[in-house]
Image: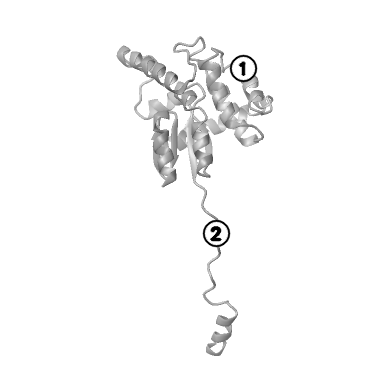
Amino acid sequence: MAALTPLITAIGLRNPSPRKRGPTVAQIAYFLNPISPWVYLAGRRPFDIAARHGAELVLHPVDVQALMARTGGTALADRHEVRKAWRLQELARWSARLGMPLVPRPRHFPTNPAPASYALIAAQEAGGGDLAALVTGFGRAVWAEERDIADDTVIRACLEGAGFDPALADRGLLSGAETYARNQEVAVAQGVFGVPTWVVDAQVFWGQDRLDFLDAHLAG
């Protein structure tokens, strides 16, 4: 065997050079609910940040009421009046700063966000459209246009407006419901307690006002 060592080394079978690998793509988990005004106000910014840094943004729609109950939060209906008043002030401030129209007490809030969440899940799986446009479309429907995103007609219109097959509103119901439940467990396991939240490299960024920190983290 000793006599073969020079030959093995010469043809490169011993201590081969490491295989070149491409750059690692960061994956950002985006926990959201289409009815949240803060998700609406986040708008396209998380998608733009991910694109700028070559990162992959993966949507995880979650039941935010159930998530808060599991992680020590308080549902909006159960909060003290002073907290509710402050929330309305903050919504008005951010709406003005971002130039995004927002009705503070829209006609169809609250409503059941599960069907729209299932549609988001189905659209992400199907591809072919603009997920950022779909997320913002649902938010705009609730907070600017005062439409009911539990209504199948509204869901289909939002899907079509974002370039997706409107039939996903029906086809994605079963798989969407299963993924929606799994997302809840993923959220809790990753330390998520509200929406919108972005998780990357075990760092948790909660709130649309933390997007600058997400951007800085990805920039290194």
Tell me residue 5's x, y (percent): 54, 85
Q: Along the line of sight, which residue is nearer the eye, 90 or 37?
A: 90
Residue for badge 1: 154
Residue at position x 50%, y 43% in the image = 53
Look at label 1 and name its amino acid.
Val
Tell me residue 75's x, y (percent): 38, 20
Q: How is the image coloured?
A: one colour
Q: Nearer the viewer, mark 1 or mark 2?
A: 2
Q: Secondary structure at mark 1?
A: helix
Q: Label 1: few (<14), some or many (≥20) within 10 Å?
A: some
Residue at position x 60%, y 80% in the image = 11
Residue at position x 60%, y 27% in the image = 119
Left or right side of 48 for 87? left
Q: Label 2: few (<14), some or many (≥20) within 10 Å?
A: few
Q: Along the line of sight, which residue is nearer the eye, 220 or 29?
A: 220
In this rendering, is residue 126 above or below 89? below
